[in-house]
Image (cartoon, rainbow, N blue to C red):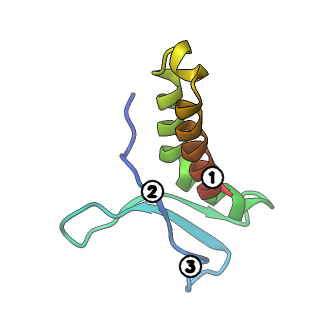
Amino acid sequence: MTHTPGPWNLNGGPNPTNPRHYTVYVKPEGPETVEHICSVSDRMSPDWKTNAKLIAAAPKLLEALEVYQQTSPVQRATWKWHTAWYEQMTAAIKAAT
């Protein structure tokens, strides 16, 4: 299964035409086009703003988990690897919160 490559972006705050609505989108390199991923509004959940942030962070979260999955137990035991993993996980969590 594949997904639209990231980074996914949040429209930076509520949509000016609908302040209770966020859009998650991808802005590909090149032409001035935007690919719509999803819309989230307050009608869906009381946690709609947080949900929109989490959805936008999904590719970063997936990438962080894939890095962890591909490392060996020996690599996981080293401090150098732990530091890089921690930084990547921290960035993904920050993007989602």
- How much space separates mark 1 and mark 2, taking CA atoms? 10 Å
Q: Which residue is mark 2?
A: 8
Total labels: the figure holds: 3
User: The C terminus appears in which quarter of the rendering?
Assistant: bottom right
Rendered location of residue 39, percent (x, y) = 55, 61
**1 in relation to 53, above or below:** above
Q: Position of residue 70 (x, y in %)?
A: 45, 21
Q: Of helix, strand and loop, which one carries label 3?
A: loop
Residue at image position (33%, 66%) is 34
As rendered, which of 66 and 22 lies closer to the eye? Answer: 66
> Which element is circle 1 on?
helix
Q: Is residue 22 above or below residue 86?
A: below
**The N terminus sits in image quarter:** top left
Ranked by sequence position, the earlier of labels 1 and 2 is 2
Residue found 59% across the figure and 69% down from its top: 22
Q: Nearer the viewer, mark 2 or mark 3?
A: 2
Q: Which mark is residue 94?
A: none
Q: Nearer the viewer, mark 1 or mark 3?
A: 1
**Percent x, y of residue 66:** 48, 29
Considering every residue shown, the one lying at the far front of the view is 79
Q: Amino acid at mark 2?
A: Trp
- Amino acid tagged 1: Leu
Disc 2 + disc 3, Cβ < 8 Å: no
Q: Which residue is mark 3?
A: 15
Q: Please indicate whether residue 64 sits to the left or right of residue 53 in the image.
A: left
- Structural crowding at the residue carrying mark 1, measured as other residues with C-alpha within 10 Å and reported as few (<14), some (14–19) or many (≥20): some
Q: Which residue is mark 1?
A: 54
